[in-house]
Image (tube, rainbow, N blue to C red):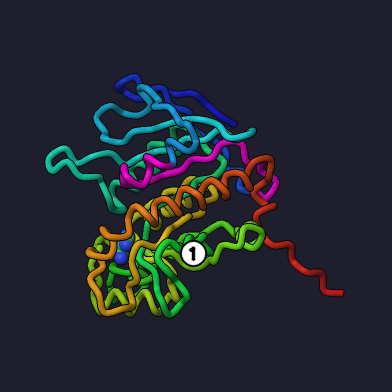
Amino acid sequence: MLAGSRDEVGISMIVSTSSDTTGDQAIEHVLILMAMRDEATPVIEALNLAPLADALDPRLPMRCYRGSLGRLTITLGLAGVDERYDVDNVGSEAAAVLALETIRSYAPDLVISAGTAGGFASRGANIATVYLSQSRFVFHDRHVPLDGFRESAIGGYPALDVSAMAQALAFPTGVISTGSSLEKSDRDLEVLGDNAAVAKEMEAAGIAWVAMLYGVPMLAVKSITNIVDQNNQSETEFVRNFAYASASLTRGLCSVLRYLDGRRIGDLAAVAESAD
Ligand code: ADE
């Protein structure tokens, strides 16, 4: 059920008053959330998305684009620019604000966190490998050694079961792990290992927290720019491979969207084998 409302600066919002997250939910409106303009531009061009005028609170730097693919409505939300330094708003704070604003405004059936990430050679990653999320989203740099706070800080927010889609499209899957640094630190690497993470990035868990609170199914599509478990500098590899990995991300995301067209949430999960 959808209800129209208005906030104090007159931005019209659509607030979902139900959270039908059953597998029966038809996928009609997909919200893609991204951090970097150079990751998003090839996606916006490939899907022919147009800017959404006056979409969100004008005090926020976030920007939205809209288009369709088959029967799907697609909204792409971009975290916007830190005008002080003319750089993209990377990180989970901007990602969570973007998720909150766009989920409240557009009531999507499904949220996708899309972007680039560091990968792990020990888990089979190459530059431009595209992963789909599986099982849960975690934070690897929130170290709070007190009972309850420890687990809450790590997150463990639900990732939609997309095992049938991943198998059909031949994407590897795994836990996506979020932190506030491109650099790697030993303690963060330990937590990444504890969670058997396949991708180290900077936004997904922040989005997943909001998606969980609002009862919206969420998955992530992440393309690898740099290999974390090698003797290298993440930032150097990231810059060198960014355009190549972003092109792979666009192809991966488009094939996910084509697969979603005409399906229900429950169709993305593997069918359980019967006992007999
Ligand atoms: N984005 C791309 N590579 C990354 C890494 N190694 N860490 C965090 N975010 C990333």
Tag 1: residue type? Arg
Going 39% across and 43% down the picture, which residue do you hit?
99
Residue bounds of the magenta highlight: 22-42
In the figure, 110 relative to 168: above or below? above
**Position of residue 141 measured from the top left corner of the image (x, y, whole percent):** 28, 68
In the figure, 91 relative to 43: above or below? below
Q: Report the residue marked by disc 1.
A: 136
Query: Where's the C terminus, which quadrant?
Result: bottom right
Identify the residue at the far right of this view.
276
Residue 153 appears in the picture as rendered: no
**Is residue 222 covered in magenta?**
no
Quadrant of the rendered structure where residue 165 is? bottom right
Task: Using a 10 Å C-alpha cutoff, classify the residue at mark 1 as few (fewer than 14 neighbours), some (14 to 19) or many (20 or more).
Answer: many
Quadrant of the rendered structure where residue 153 is? bottom left
Going 69% across and 52% down the picture, which residue do you hit?
267
In the figure, 96 relative to 12: above or below? below
Going 33% across and 43% down the picture, which residue do you hit?
97
* Quarter of the render that holds ligand 1: bottom left
**Position of residue 136 measured from the top left corner of the image (x, y, whole percent):** 49, 64
